[in-house]
Amino acid sequence: MESALAQLIAEFGGPTPLPAGGAAGVAAIAMGAALGTKVLRISGMPQEGTELSRLLDRLTPQYRTDCDAFESVLLAMKLPREAPGKEVALEDAWLDATRAPVQVAGLAQQIEEVLEGCQGRVKVSVAGDLSSALCLTRAGREIAEGNARENALRLDPEVAREVLSDLG
């Protein structure tokens, strides 16, 4: 287990631009959901645990989606200024880089709702772990929402409003 954590830390602290903040947010949410799943299993709450596992399965690919979206931004930015289609490539890349964290934030919200619905119902021995799961999930959602808003600054304002409308 320690080597997996060390590898993840090395990836985030490494010399390449990716993974970055969006992927860190996904990782935080995934850790929260995984910890929550354990809490629910220990507490004998299979229905809620199944729902949380389903959401985690939908969230996990978002790590790669976020990295791919931002890599597209970096590639479009490297195009020569006069390159045909650079403006469109940048617009499309920023749009994808905005949609990805919006989707992550939506999944985080659903995970939070499941976890919050379990408060006061889990075994006392793991109640602190449920609180930790919620903190991780909320932190990841805040990261996703912040990234979405920051990336949307590069979009046409009308498009940005539409894409961000799911954030609430």
Image: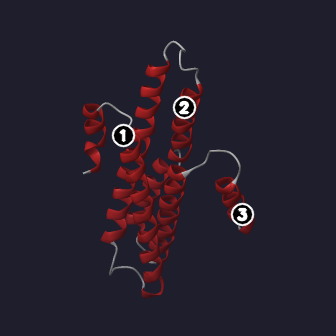
Name the element at disc 1: helix
Name the amino acid, label 2. Answer: Ser
Q: Gap in Å between the C-alphas at discs 3 and 1?
A: 33 Å
* Residue position for label 3: 6
* Residue position for label 2: 72
- Is 147 rendered above or below residue 3? above
Taking the spot 53% from the left edge, 15% from the top edge, the residue there is 82
Q: Position of residue 119 (x, y in %)?
A: 33, 77
Q: Earlier in the sequence, mark 2 or mark 1?
A: 2
Name the amino acid, label 1. Answer: Ala
Which disc number belongs to residue 85? Answer: none
Q: Earlier in the sequence, mark 2 or mark 3?
A: 3
Taking the spot 43% from the left edge, 49% from the top edge, the residue there is 147
Name the element at disc 2: helix
Q: Which dot, 3 or 1, sits closer to the camera?
A: 1
Q: Gap in Å between the C-alphas at discs 2 and 3?
A: 27 Å
Q: Position of residue 3 (x, y in %)?
A: 75, 64
Closer to the camera, 77 or 53? 77
Q: Position of residue 159 (x, y in %)?
A: 29, 32
- Is 58 rendered above or below residue 35? above
Closer to the camera, 134 or 155? 155
Name the amino acid, label 3. Answer: Ala
Q: Gap in Å between the C-alphas at discs 2 and 1?
A: 15 Å
Q: Position of residue 35 (x, y in %)?
A: 51, 69
- Point out the residue furthest to the bottom here: 124
Q: Quadrant of residue 130?
A: bottom left
Q: How many marks?
A: 3
Name the element at disc 3: helix
Which disc number belongs to residue 152? Answer: 1
- Point out the residue furthest to the top here: 84
- Point out the residue furthest to the front here: 81
Q: Which dot, 2 or 3, sits closer to the camera?
A: 2
